[in-house]
């Protein structure tokens, strides 16, 4: 094989050779870049301790638990109609054409999508809302099937059989449907930016509330004079204004005490920092570390030969020119 490549390297036209070499180097470099991405993700996961939701600090952290739908939510995957907390799907159509080699067929994507609905990660101490927008999601479940309609078949939840939502959905198989999903109850690992909204995280602005109350009273001069003009001279002096301020402060404090504090909501979302990836994985931390290790080994096995052989071809070409 190397002898054939060496022969082609010497005989190929300059345009053909250098374009091919440039493409090969770009592909090899791209694969090597993904090796670095997965190595960085492994390092971040290994260096970040697992937190419990109830005692989690604000900031970048990892959680482990299981997936649950939001209260009252009944999200369905659009292709199979199965219940899930997250999904991605792709519908492809087989396109047939004729070329110099005869009849040819390829799959063209006609529709695709990814869920962005919020769901819960639940651990023994509480639950945290997960906003999957911008996350690198690795689900455990995936399925591919075929049909003859843009409207795919659905999954019958009671007996697990595929049924057709359109006449002739199974036959010539001109459409291919691919779906990936995370089910409620599945083990879940997530690492991202943890923030708490509402509850104790919301501080009551006493000074602002007091200023609003005093402005409201100033606009109603009749009320202000009737309540605080003790000497009945038709104006509010400094001593009377101090009394008004004190009563306004007491009223604001009473309103604060009576107000209902919204329950706190914990949220894990995108960090906005490439060095701190947002990852959602259906499984344990050990499983995702093993997955990234396999990715790195596989990508290295592809990228290194491409780069080495391309550089060898370039050196051979320069040596014979």
Image (spheres, rainbow, N blue to C red):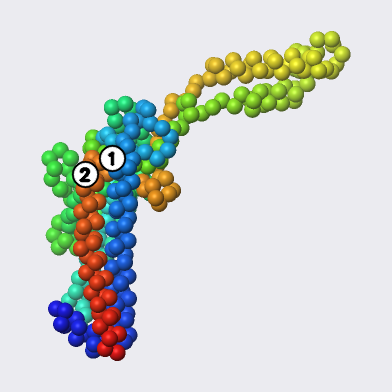
Q: Which residue is at the front of the view, 191 or 83?
A: 191
Quadrant in which the N terminus is drawn:
bottom left
Q: CA distance from mark 2 to mark 1?
A: 10 Å
Q: Which residue is at the front of the view, 228 or 52?
A: 52
Q: Residue at x 15, y 48 (%)?
A: 162
Residue 46 screen position, x and y as percent? 29, 43
Image quarter of residue 52: top left
Q: Secondary structure at mark 1?
A: strand
**Cβ–Cβ under 8 Å for marks 2 and 1:** yes
Q: Is 165 on the left or on the right of 38, as rendered?
A: left
Tally of numbered discs: 2
Q: Which residue is at the front of the view, 318 or 34?
A: 318
Quadrant in which the C terminus is drawn:
bottom left
Q: Which residue is at the front of the view, 91 or 55?
A: 55
The residue furthest top is 231
Q: Which mark is residue 30?
A: none
The residue furthest right is 233
Residue pointed to by mark 1 = 189
Q: Is residue 200 visible?
A: yes
Residue pointed to by mark 2 = 287
Q: Is 240 on the left or on the right of 160, as rendered?
A: right
Q: Residue at x 28, y 80 (%)?
A: 314
Badge 1 density bin: few <14, some 14–19, many ≥20, Cα 10 Å:
many
Residue 254 screen position, x and y as percent? 59, 15
């Amino acid at each position: 094989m190397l002898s054939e490549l060496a022969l082609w390297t010497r005989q190929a036209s300059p345009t053909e050779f250098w374009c091919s070499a440039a493409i090969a180097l770009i592909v090899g470099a791209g694969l090597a870049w993904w090796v670095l991405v997965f190595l960085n993700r492994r390092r971040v996961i290994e260096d970040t301790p697992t937190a419990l939701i109830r005692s989690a600090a604000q900031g970048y952290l990892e959680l482990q638990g299981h997936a649950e739908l939001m209260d009252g939510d009944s999200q369905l995957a659009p292709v199979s109609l199965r219940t899930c907390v997250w999904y991605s799907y792709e519908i492809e159509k087989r396109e047939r054409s004729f070329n110099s080699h005869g009849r040819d067929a390829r799959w063209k994507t006609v529709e695709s999508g990814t869920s962005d609905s919020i769901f819960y990660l639940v651990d023994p101490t509480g639950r945290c809302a997960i906003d999957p927008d911008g996350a690198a999601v690795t689900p455990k479940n995936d399925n591919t099937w075929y049909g003859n309609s843009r409207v795919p078949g659905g999954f019958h939840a009671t007996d697990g059989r595929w049924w057709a939502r359109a006449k002739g959905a199974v036959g010539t198989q001109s459409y291919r449907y691919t779906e990936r999903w995370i089910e409620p109850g599945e083990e879940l690992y997530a690492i991202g930016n943890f923030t708490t909204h509402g509850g104790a995280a919301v501080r009551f602005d006493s000074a602002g509330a007091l200023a609003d109350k005093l402005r409201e009273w100033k606009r109603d001069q009749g009320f202000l004079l009737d309540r605080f003009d003790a000497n009945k001279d038709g104006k509010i002096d400094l001593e009377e204004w101090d009394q008004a301020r004190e009563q306004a402060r007491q009223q604001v404090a009473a309103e604060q005490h009576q107000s209902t504090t919204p329950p706190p909501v914990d949220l894990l979302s995108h960090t906005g920092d490439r060095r701190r990836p947002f990852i959602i994985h259906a499984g344990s931390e050990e499983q995702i570390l093993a997955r990234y290790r396999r990715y790195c080994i596989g990508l290295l096995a592809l990228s290194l030969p491409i780069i080495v052989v391309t550089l060898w071809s370039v050196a051979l070409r320069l040596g014979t020119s």
